Amino acid sequence: MPLQDLSLPAAWPVALGLPLGFGLLAFVLRWVRRSGLIAGVPLGVLVLRLGGVAGFGILAAFFLLGTLLTRLGYARKAAAGVAEEAGGRRGASHALANCGTGLLVLIGHALLGGGSLPPVLWAAYVGAFAAAASDTSSSEIGQLYGKHPISPRTLRPVPVGTEGAVSTEGTLGGIGAAAVLAGVGGAFGVLSLHGILAVTVGGFLGNFLESLAGTWGRKLLPHGLLNFANTVVGAIASAGLLAALTALLP
């Protein structure tokens, strides 16, 4: 089918079969827990029905990139006490916190009449996943390679693994991950060059603000809600930046 048709709602056989097959493979490979499989398959079905193959492809790219980053140097991170629990396998809480905003964008558009998703909403959808990917990359790369982490609030050095800490290596990793998700959106034909730039910046902005909020620890918000807030900021910032770029540089 033409590239632009990848954003159209998928037929039911595809919408049911693709998430189930992908989820079972991820479960067999021990990338997700049982709860992640149970939550992830219906989420994938909804995305395929509302956002087409393009929407699912962006979701899958986020999941695969996050899994790769989490498993990168896992033994070393585990020895340092900063690795993700359960061998890095994702559960239902991860699916909801990281994918909820993108799904809400699609559901909200459908409830308001549906039709083709406009560019600004595609920027919001991809921006939510770009923010989540940026956060994962900053954490995993920073914990593995970061040499001089600091608190973004006080600018003082802090130990590796400190909540909200940032490092040069982690920051570059976060920008790179946001750019990868933006590039995937471009490859599926749902983001223009303006959109790719907006999502890269907006996704990283969500990540940075989460790091800043994280310096107050979980007294501000539980970790899962911080992750969700990160994706909300990424979605809003990406959509806003695209609107501004379109107005300034038509």
Image (cartoon, helix red, strand yellow):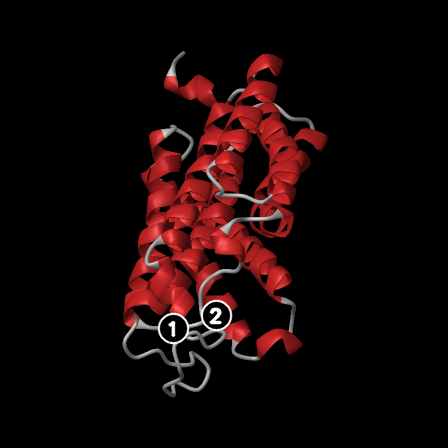
Residue 226 visible in rendering: yes
Q: Position of residue 69 (x, y in %)?
A: 37, 52
Circle 1: element type: loop
* Circle 1 Cα neighbour tier, 10 Å, few/some/many (<14 / 14–19 / ≥20): many
Q: Earlier in the sequence, mark 1 or mark 2?
A: 1
Vertical comparison of 234 with 141: above or below: above
Tell me if label 1 and label 2 are in contact, CB under 8 Å. yes
Q: Position of residue 7 (x, y in %)?
A: 49, 24
Count the marks: 2
Along the line of sight, the residue nearer the viewer: 225 or 27: 27
| Mark 2 lies on residue | 211
Report the residue at 30% width, 71% height from top. 146
Report the residue at 42% width, 31% height from top. 190
Please state, as top left, top right, bottom left or bottom right, where the N terminus lies in the image.
Answer: top left
Report the residue at 33% width, 73% height from top. 167
| Mark 1 lies on residue | 166
Q: Specify the quadrant of the image occupied by residue 73.
A: bottom left
Q: Is residue 73 left or right of residue 133?
A: left
Q: Position of residue 61 (x, y in %)?
A: 41, 38
Vertical comparison of 152 with 202: above or below: below
Report the residue at 33% width, 40% height from top. 183
Q: Position of residue 40 (x, y in %)?
A: 60, 37
> What amino acid type is highlighted by mark number 2?
Ser
Question: What is the C-alpha distance between the residues marked 1 and 2?
Answer: 7 Å
Residue 248 visible in rendering: no
Vertical comparison of 196 with 186: above or below: below
Please state, as top left, top right, bottom left or bottom right, where the C terminus lies in the image.
Answer: top left
Q: Which label is found at residue 45?
A: none
Q: Specify the quadrant of the image occupied by residue 75.
A: bottom left
> What amino acid type is highlighted by mark number 1?
Val
Circle 2: element type: helix
Vertical comparison of 10 with 221: above or below: above
